[in-house]
Amino acid sequence: MRRYGKNPDEDDIRVRPNRKGNRPRTHIRPKHEDAEDGMVLTVDRGRLTCLVDGRTVVAMKARELGRKAAVVGDTVSIVGDLSGEKDTLARIVRIAPRRTVLRRTADDDDPYERVVVANADQLAIVTALADPEPRPRMIDRCLVAAYDGGLTPLLVLTKSDLASPEKLLEAYTPLGVPYIVTSREELENGDAAERVRELLEGKVTAFVGHSGVGKTTLVNALVPEDRRRTTGNVNAVTGRGRHTTTSALALPLPGDRGWVVDTPGVRSFGLHHVDPSRVIHAFPDLEPGTEECPRGCTHDGNQPECALDAWVAEGHADPARLDSLRRLLATRERREGD
């Protein structure tokens, strides 16, 4: 049997043709020194709208990136036609490392992690005071995701003309979470929008909230030049709204004062991706009470030595907050035991 080395030069060697007709795979990736940086504004069925040097460019992900996906807020390197003209298509060849990441799963039993927004500085948690009723545990989940992803939380309470914010604020003002209260009338006359803009100055802020809370209405007031379709009616039986925002979209605030990222309304905010040991960091009113806990304490209520019960009994924190923490931990433990 005749054998050849790595670099044979014999003329009689037969080379098997590539039946697929495509180029052979290679691990060598082009460097693309001429690529320009841009920011992903929205993603729609594999097409990414990016801002490149003041122009809106539509691009697709290069094959060499493999399964790595770009999301809204990502800084990307782009090659190809960067004119931004109609029917042109560029190519994303690199995705820069992310400063912060807002992640969620569909529920606590779902292992599939979804990156909602990258490189946001702030997470605005929008909650209606009525119609639909506020959901404190949803707020707690968003706080966990914010702290875990490196974002600063901001609580935005809407529809104060329908209910008082006092009860909800009693639970969250001790945590030092900044907040703002708005009403429909203030949104219509522009007063509330300007007060909110002051809290968004110079930042990239992602807006999250369950359907019907007025999130997109608020975004429309903040960025009137790029109005999105407002939310649908709230279901009288379930107390839930209808989804009207179907994809995340980054919008610049007037006067280049910052960025707003409007995200689709959510009905659940799964925390499958968050390590249970890090959940306590979202409860700064309870965290000091863990100093007297034994090593390895899970704070889930199943260990009699947990110091959080005494901490709350002494009046350092609201019992409802400890209940919320343990409910979150219970869902994490069920997932771990599956």
Image (cartoon, grey):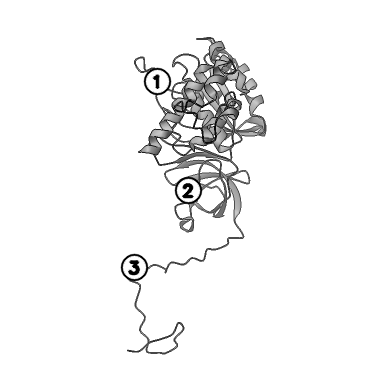
**What's the amino acid at mark 2?**
Ala
- Where is the C terminus found, in terms of image quarters? top left
User: Which residue carries the number 3 mark?
Assistant: 20
Residue that appears at 47% across and 13% down: 130
User: Which residue carries the number 1 mark?
Assistant: 240
- Callout 2 crowding tier (Cα within 10 Å): few <14, some 14–19, many ≥20: few
**What's the amino acid at mark 3?**
Lys
Label 1 or label 2, whichever comes before in sequence order: 2
Q: Secondary structure at mark 1?
A: loop
- Callout 1 crowding tier (Cα within 10 Å): few <14, some 14–19, many ≥20: some
The one of 212 and 179 positioned closer to us in this rendering: 179
How far separated are the C-alphas under marks 1 and 2? 31 Å
**Does any portion of residue 226 appear in the rendered image?**
no
Residue that appears at 51% across and 17% down: 319
Residue that appears at 63% across and 46% down: 53
- Choose mark 2 or mark 3, whichever is in front: 2
**What's the amino acid at mark 1?**
Arg
Disc on res. 69: 2
Residue that appears at 40% across and 19% down: 233
How far separated are the C-alphas under marks 3 and 1? 52 Å
